[in-house]
Amino acid sequence: MTLPLLKVAVVGHTNVGKTSLLRTLLRDTTFGEISDRPGTTRAVCGATIEVNAHPLLQLFDTPGLEDSIGLLEELEAHRADHRADGLDLVDSFLDGTLAGARFAQEAKTLRQVLDCDAALYVIDAREQVLAKYRDELRILGYCAKPVVPVLNFVASEEAIIEDWRDQLARVSMHAVAEFDTVVLESQGETRLYEKMQSLLDRFRPTLEALIVHRREERNLCSRASARSISEMLVDVAAFSMSVDARDQDATTAAIESLRNLVRGREQRCIQELLELHRFGSDEYQPLDLPIEAGRWSVDLFSPEALQTYGIGGGGGAAAGAMVGLTVDVVFFAGLSLGAATAIGAAIGAAIGAGRLPGRKLLEKVTRRVDLRVEDSTCQLLIAREIDLARALFNRGHASVDPIRVADRAAGSAPSERKALARSLRRAAGKRRWSRIAEGPSPAPFVPDPARERLADRIAEELEPLIRRES
Amino acid sequence: MTESVYHPHMAPPQESAPALAHGRGVRFSDRLLAEAVRAYESSTAEPLDDRAVLVAIRADDPTADPEQRIALRAARVEIADDITDALGQVRTVAGWTVFGATILALIAGGIAARSALQDQTANVFGLVAGLLGVQTIMLGIWIVLMVVGRRGIGGGLLGVVVLNAARWLLRRIGRGRAHVAAVEAAGVVAGRGVIGKWFVSTVSHMVWASANVGMLIVLAASFIGEGYRFRWDSTWLSEPAYERLIETISIIPQSVGFQTPNAEQIAMSRRSHTEAAGEWSQRSRRAWSWLFFGSILMYGLVPRTVLLLLSAAMRRRAQAAYRLDLAHPGFARLCARMEAAGRSSHEPASHDKGAGLAPHDLPRRDDTRPIGPPAFIGLEIRSPRTGWPPDIGRAVTDLGLVDGRDDRDRVVGALRGGESQPSALVVVCPLPASPDRGIARAIADFRREIGSPVFVVLTGGAELAKRAPADMIARRVEDWRALAVQSGVPSGHLLEIDIDHLTHGTRAMLAAVAEGRVPERTAERRLEAAFSVIGEHAERWTGLVTIEEQFALHRAIGEKYEHTRTEWLKSFSGSSLRVAAGGVFDSDRVKDCLMEAADRVTRLLPDALRINPRWMAAGAVAGALGCLSATVLISPVAIGALPAWSVLGGAIGAVVRRASGSASKPESATDHVSFEDALRGATLFTLLLELQGREQASISRVLEWTLGEMDDDAPTLETTRSWLDDVRHRFDLALAAEHGP
């Protein structure tokens, strides 16, 4: 026995966010067309949610009901026969000529409702309760299908939820769902399906399967996001570039190239996060405050970025060309003298002309230094990507506004970032742990069990931060 | 519902038994390929173009689960062949490395055995300790590693050595992206779960078994060709202990039929060369040699071979149990894409698109009734804060707030049955609401009943501005205009007037409308005068501008616009600040008022300016100082009651900081702002005063055209005049564009 397919029409007044509701339920930023203008959807359009290749829920977007007062008048004019019930009225209206002309839009919607098992009636909770909405509910009542009212824009300050609930209770609609299509609240969707369950006994298992599916998908998504960030962090922390310390030009070039590689790695992580949260499609281009065209607008290696997140420079006076970077002086066979921050841009000069005793010896053994990113850069990456993942985690697929990370670094406390950055230090100097590839034909990256353990551990620490409610 | 029907898109946790329904028919090699393709994709910024593949996979087997689909996709993407070849190469390299190690072990085993047999004397200790002892210890280590070792590579030190050699080779052999991906995938697969462990064990046991074979070959060859005496000199071991040791070793070889030395033969091995030379019988030699041969066979080769087979079997099992980790970002992303590719959008048939919006411009009633007072209808609006109907300074007919069929019927009846017809019918509609056909029909129905002009007034602009940017408000006004035209109301008869916030100008507009005429805008132009005031003040500023200096400028600009002052006073001065005039201002309340005024102005700004923190700061300055100067213009004594400038400066600083976000300079936090911010603020204030009496959307548009494309070069003391000239020029162009040809 397979689960029965549930067909649901999404109906409502014009411009209340029906298509937005579909987008969010489908996790599809490209479904239909949405705008702030009325009558954007002019035809019925449907989509199916499948779970493991089994279609479970078919949702139909319908044109908005615009003239319910006129339509109700029309329906009641058909009531020649006093024994006719609501359904008869709707049927005879749909057979009539008006259904093809003046009320063509409403007729499409009513036909779809009759063709479905249930209807979701979307309400813009910011609007005052008007007679025309009551008439819409009455007409839907005539269709003799279970109707679940869905209050949209409940996260808005202007939402008058109590008024609406009161009004709906008067027409015996108690199973009201609150679901903001722009602000995705983890429980909102579950509650919506539960409300539908209460009215649709036959489809209880179908809806249960959907609820379970969405919950597991959310878990999977947060796990994958955490993993994506932790992989990026390990790659960045482990990455280093070896340069000849006495060659100033080569050093400068290496600094720039290291930065670009790290920036590129962060960018890949952002792209992954967007895709994981189903915001990765080409058509979806959020213009945004912190992120421009899919990348953070403030450069990773700018003092401003560190300042925004209140992260102090790591070891000391790293400034200018060396912001966010540090240097390891390498002896034979990778034996390190440790971080020698603050050497500044002139690493070459500093080491070459250092007035150290035994300079010649030092020169001989330290021809090469390792450039790598500093703790502070790791902390900044942690803060930024957690913020982004959290913003995406709670973002409805109908949002067309920029991704706003309202409270910078709200997703992670400085102590948490520091702890994570400390764990990441284990990767420092282990160039082979980094997937960041240098040059056109890099050596293969062979996963190292210790590296995988570190990445796992960091992912485990990141996940609760991503999921933490603000 | 049965369990087998529904299985969510989840990777089973690695620890638990894998769900049986997952990956039906997917082999280990397919999964390995999928891992390699994923590794390949993660190494490149551009994802593979697989749309066609995803669609085809779905079409071929709509019931495939995510793992099957991932595996199928991996096999069909363009680079699959390259990666398969690369995986083959990895296998080959690994195979040859293991083979090499096996051969080496064979030789090493032989050498070890040979070194225990010298000068026709077999060193018993060398044979026992060297040939059996070492590998027994290694076996012990293997057992310990298998029990306590972590997941991933481990188990069998020799195996790890061999594997590292293979890695080393692989790092050097190929550099192609497919090769890199294949190596990574092999590493991932080996590192997850227990495959790696059993693989290393297999290699380890194979190497040891080979070494044992080497030993046995050398021993056999030696024992066949030469006669050996066996001896073991020991300082510590007593005679009985030695005997027990040898007897113990003998147990297993003996039990499978090998000859073993008896007590006397054992004792013989303790005697020195010369002593025993003559006593070594053929029998003793045979017993001893069979003992060693048997021991290495039974303690070395047989257990290693058994463990080799066991490890190989366990590895196969682990491979069969291997599942792709769908929580891995690479696969989770792919699942998202596959879901999108599979989502079918469909349009049910028989829908006639585009039908619907029939115009309602039906013939009007030929109304010959006498003209009465104007009539006001509030259509689907909330009761205004300032009361209904709006006070326009003359008598009006109140047809009430209309919501629903009964109300509409009542109004239509009143219009039809009245003794006079209104001089004009003003239908007030909510701007925040979306216009719909129902409203259009209602307006058309009202209009049909009378012969006098009908106006549509949109209220609630300030409310909408809280949640929508200026361009959306402009679009909304246009949608309403379209609706008005559709209901037979001329486009010019649609006005945006916020009934909740009536100003002198808008009230005058309403009054004009009530008389049945389209209001004209006849604002006197004071822009030039005001700009010249700005220029004069700016010349006196040095560096940072104090709040007091700015306030003086705003006040001077305000005085230039005194002729329209009642109008703009409303927009800038919060009533609460005015009420307090005469008394002492409470600085907290002043701050709230300034905030509100600043908000009101920044909300007026079009999007193009809102994204610029400079203009947001300027808007906040204009709002806050406009509010203050308005207050002082109304009651000049209020200036004495204002809080200290530093308090006001703090409040304005906070307003500016909030408006401009983090990009504002720290100096705006104190009681002065930069020259640039001060100049921009005063300019914006002037433009707003000049534009008073217009609709909100119109103000926003003109501001956008005037300031939206100003160069972002900061105006300086030297360039102030030319900067202001530039603004004036753009303002003229914007006004021309707004009024149209």
Image (spheres, helix red, strand yellow):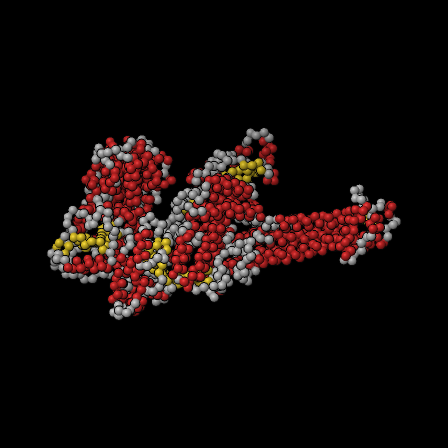
Question: Residue B71: x and y, percent?
Answer: 53, 59
Compare residues A290 and A252 and report the one nearer the observer. A290
Q: Is residue B125 visible?
A: yes
Question: Residue B186: x and y, percent?
Answer: 58, 53
Compare residues B638 and B461 and report the one nearer the observer. B638
Residue B614 vs B252, above or below: the answer is above
Which residue appears farthest toward the left when viewing the image?
B370
The residue sitting at 41% across, 42% down in the picture is A408
> Seen in the image, is A159 located left or right of residue B119?
left
> Seen in the image, is A239 located left or right of residue B98?
left
Question: Residue B579: x and y, percent?
Answer: 23, 38
The residue sitting at 58% across, 53% down in the picture is B193
Q: Is residue B112 visible?
A: no
Compare residues B676 and A269 and report the one nearer the observer. A269
Residue A1 vs A245, above or below: the answer is below
Q: Quadrant of residue B436?
A: bottom left
Number of labelled discs?
Answer: 0
> Seen in the image, is B340 located left or right of residue B227?
left
The residue sitting at 80% across, 42% down in the picture is B235
The residue sitting at 67% across, 48% down in the picture is B141
Compare residues A206 and B668 and report the one nearer the observer. A206
Residue B641 vs B193, above or below: the answer is above
Question: Residue B375: x and y, percent?
Answer: 17, 53
